[in-house]
Image: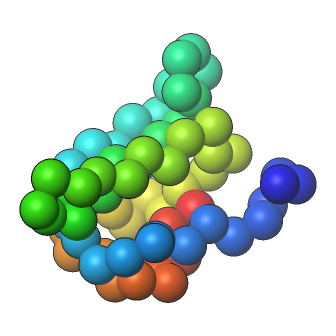
């Protein structure tokens, strides 16, 4: 997708990782949806800087 395209959470969950980096996955967020499911949102130009570990997110919430 083009830079600046909104990224939405695929489902409800808890933020389990937030990292700013220029290497590997770059800026990325991991959301733990429970029942063994996690979603990695990687190579993001930016993400919602208000996120911190343990925050709850809702499906379709803009995360980046």
Q: Name the spot of residue 54 as percent of width and height, x first.
A: 13, 61
Res 22 visible:
yes
Res 52 visible:
no
Q: Name the spot of residue 55 as percent of width and height, x first.
A: 20, 68
The furthest residue to the right? 2
Q: Name the spot of residue 13 as percent of width and height, x first.
A: 24, 71
Q: Name the spot of residue 34 as percent of width and height, x first.
A: 14, 64
Q: Is residue 27 above or below residue 55?
A: above
Residue at 69% over, 70% down: 6
Q: Is residue 41 above or below residue 20?
A: below
User: For the C terminus, which image quadrant?
Assistant: bottom right
Q: Is residue 10 above or below residue 42?
A: below
Numbered label tally:
0
Relative placement, left or right, of 13 versus 35 is right
Q: Is residue 26 above or below residue 10?
A: above
User: For the N terminus, which image quadrant?
Assistant: bottom right
Residue at 62% over, 66% down: 7
Residue at 54% over, 27% down: 25
Relative placement, left or right, of 10 versus 32 is right
Residue at 39% over, 36% down: 19
């Amino acid at each position: 997708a083009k830079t600046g395209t909104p990224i939405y959470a695929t489902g409800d969950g808890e933020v389990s990782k937030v990292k700013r980096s220029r290497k590997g996955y770059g800026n990325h967020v991991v959301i733990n949806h429970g029942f063994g499911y996690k979603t990695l949102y990687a190579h993001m130009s930016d993400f919602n800087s208000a996120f911190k570990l343990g925050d709850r997110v809702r499906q379709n919430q803009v995360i980046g």
